[in-house]
Image (cartoon, rainbow, N blue to C red):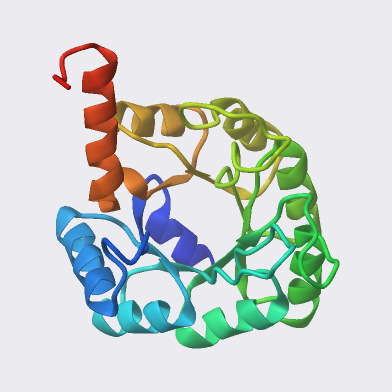
Amino acid sequence: MNSVLDQIRHRMLVSCQGYDERTFHTAEDMLAMANAAYLGGCAGFRLNSPEYVKLIKKHFPDMPVIGIWKRVTEGCDVYITPDMESVLSLRDAGADIVALDATLQKNHLGMYGYETIRQVKEEYPDIILMADCSTFEEAEKACGAGADIVSTTMSGYTPYSGYREGPDYEMLKKCREQLSCFVICEGRIWSREDAVCCFNSGADAIVVGTAITNPKLITERFVSYLKEVDIWQS
């Protein structure tokens, strides 16, 4: 485990994921994203689904991969690697780290994320687990249940974590000060300055996604701001 964490410590990983069927979503798209990020010097990838974990690992076997599996269940808000079956599928596909929803929302089996973490760690202690959290309290529970990594991934994306424009520096600082886990900052890292602030606030590593791999949303941000300051002509 330490070797993988050492590979990403004080470095940036890139989340290479599809967004919708009108933009980038195919296997070829994911491979192109990962290749561009690799050539740019990233330290690893965050990938969605066993299929893409296996694909990218085949082409970049020495690059650390955080695997997730978005599996939507009707009537359930938990969809990021929601159960042990998903965790094991990602491990078998070659993920070095498996990330899962560790919010205080129950999965389709009626379990909280920290309960799934405890279940996985009891049976498969060697799997490196990353807890995607939205609050410090969730991170604390996840760390106590055996998570190796806690992250700010879900901050601002649960009904109770509150909207924010940028990274959750407050949560990040509390995790660094009060928890023994490896700490990753992920979510709304839009600029180089944001990245530096994340590390200065205590992040061991960061994951950047949309600001690098979603040209549609990047374009929308520019256009909306130009309209906001009355430069864009209707």
Tell whether 38 sits left or right of 137: left
Q: Is residue 159 above or below residue 31?
A: above
Say which of 112 and 198 sits in front.
112
Q: Residue 89, position in %: x, y?
A: 57, 84
Q: Residue at x 21, y 11 (%)?
A: 230
Q: Residue at x 24, y 12 (%)?
A: 229
Q: Residue 216, position in %: x, y?
A: 26, 47
Q: Residue 33, position in %: x, y?
A: 23, 63
- The image quadrant that residue 221 belongs to is top left
User: In the image as oriented, which residue stretches furthest toward the front?
Assistant: 234
Give the total number of marks visible in the rendering.
0
Q: Residue 61, can we see it?
A: no
Q: Residue at x 21, y 62 (%)?
A: 38
Say which of 157 and 229 sits in front.
229
Q: Residue 200, can we see it?
A: yes
Tell whether 208 sits left or right of 90: left
- The image quadrant that residue 102 belongs to is bottom right
Q: Residue at x 27, y 76 (%)?
A: 60
Tell whether 207 sits left or right of 179: left
Q: Is residue 227 above or below residue 73?
A: above
User: In the image as oriented, which residue stretches furthest toward the top?
Assistant: 230
- The image quadrant that residue 74 belongs to is bottom right
Q: Residue 51, position in %: x, y?
A: 42, 83
Q: Is residue 50 above or below residue 155?
A: below
User: Which quarter of the image is occupied by the C terminus?
Assistant: top left
User: Which quarter of the image is occupied by the N terminus?
Assistant: bottom right
